[in-house]
Amino acid sequence: MKKALGIDIGGTKILYGIVNEQGEVVSEIQKTATPKTADEIYSTLKKIIDENYDNIDVVGLSSAGAVNIENTRVLSSTPNLPDGYNQIDFSTLCDKKVYVENDANCACAAEYKNGAAKGFRTVLMITIGTGIGGGVISDGKLFRGSSGNALEVGSMKIFADKRQKCTCGRYDCWESYASGTGLKNCAKIGAKEYSEFKTSIYKDKNPDEITTYDITDGLQAKDTFSVRVFNQWMEYMYIGLVSLTDIFNPDCIVISGGMCNFVEVQQLEDKINAESVVTDVKVKRATTGNNAGMIGAGVLALE
């Protein structure tokens, strides 16, 4: 069975391990701090590859940012990685095949191959953190679009009347409502509009200073304001997901990322299936966790 060295390049750490064709990690998982310059990142990756060279057939890299259609470079600027990172030609790291892919696509591949979506045919992966990322795999094939940049689902507009400005500079992107940042935005607006704020545990706090963590902590404390804010956030998530379900007709949606443990997956599944015009879908929470990028990169490189 062939093996890949899967490497997940994050803003603070690089995670790596050897992955087989079944999506199983067959080595110790290791990590190192992400260097501060592009040249140092290149040197670190080369060292990691050289150390594992004799035990692998290919190299798979997971990274934030849009990836070119040849899977050799990250095209877009990535704010958590240094200047010059998008100039790196990853194919020059090794004489064996080196394959780079967007981290959300890698996570989708990991869940499809050996995670929550194993055994399903068409999988929509939604990663919810500070923003929202997405990926689709159908019959084992990753959908990448004409230039490799498909599934920028966080940029999908959900309103047309310029209600809320997104961090990208446009208005009413889905991620400005349904991401971790979106939950904070819901709280900020809710503090000014919801009567529950007057009796909330946060009633003395400046609405502009309420955080995502405040709301998730408030849920645990059964704070009625936090519950109403969270329910509104879930409604925004549903709005995006039911549209994506109608477009891609997945039989499984996997929710991953830093906010996935707070998502009411059964509630989403019930609401989507009640309104969607396509066949029913299962909604699941991701199971591959922090190893998703590494596993998915290895799986995609081998395929």
Image: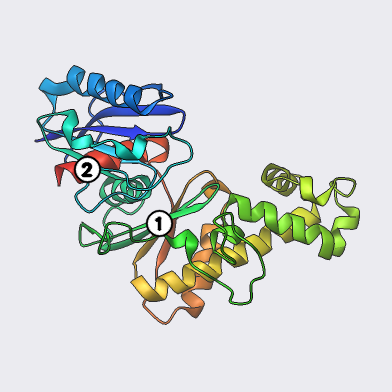
Q: Kindly identify which numbered label has been placed on residue 244.
A: none
Instruction: State the residue in front, 118 or 180.
Output: 180
Residue 81 horizontal side relative to residue 99, left or right: right
Residue at which label 1 appears: 134
Report the mark closest to the observer, 1 or 2.
Answer: 2
| Residue at image point 42% right, 48% down | 286
The residue nearer to you, when weighing 185 against 295, is 185
Q: How many marks?
A: 2
For badge 2, the amino acid type reads Thr
Neighbour tally class for label 1: few under 14, some 14-19, many 20 plus, Cα within 10 Å: many
Is residue 27 shown above or below 99?
A: above
- The residue that appears at 87% across and 64% down in the rendered structure is 195
Q: Position of residue 33 (x, y in %)?
A: 42, 21
How far apart are the alpha carbons under marks 1 and 2? 20 Å
> Is residue 22 visible in this depiction of the protein?
no
Residue 239: quarter of image? bottom right
Which sits earlier in the primary sequence, circle 1 or circle 2?
Answer: 2
Viewer-proximal residue among 102 and 268 = 102
Q: Which colour scheme is used?
A: rainbow
Which residue occupies 23% across, 35% down?
90
Q: Name the residue under label 2.
A: 72
Quarter of the image with the N terminus in it: top left
Would you identify the image quadrant in which residue 147 lies? bottom left
Amino acid type at mark 1: Gly
Q: Circle 1 sits in a helix, a strand or a loop, which is it?
A: strand
Q: How many residues crowd around disc 2 within 10 Å: few (fewer than 14), some, or many (20 or more)?
A: some
The secondary structure type at the circle numbered 2 is loop
Measured from the top left, where is residue 83 in percent x and y?
42, 34
Q: In which quarter of the image is residue 271?
A: bottom right
- Residue name at image x 65 percent, y 54 percent: 183
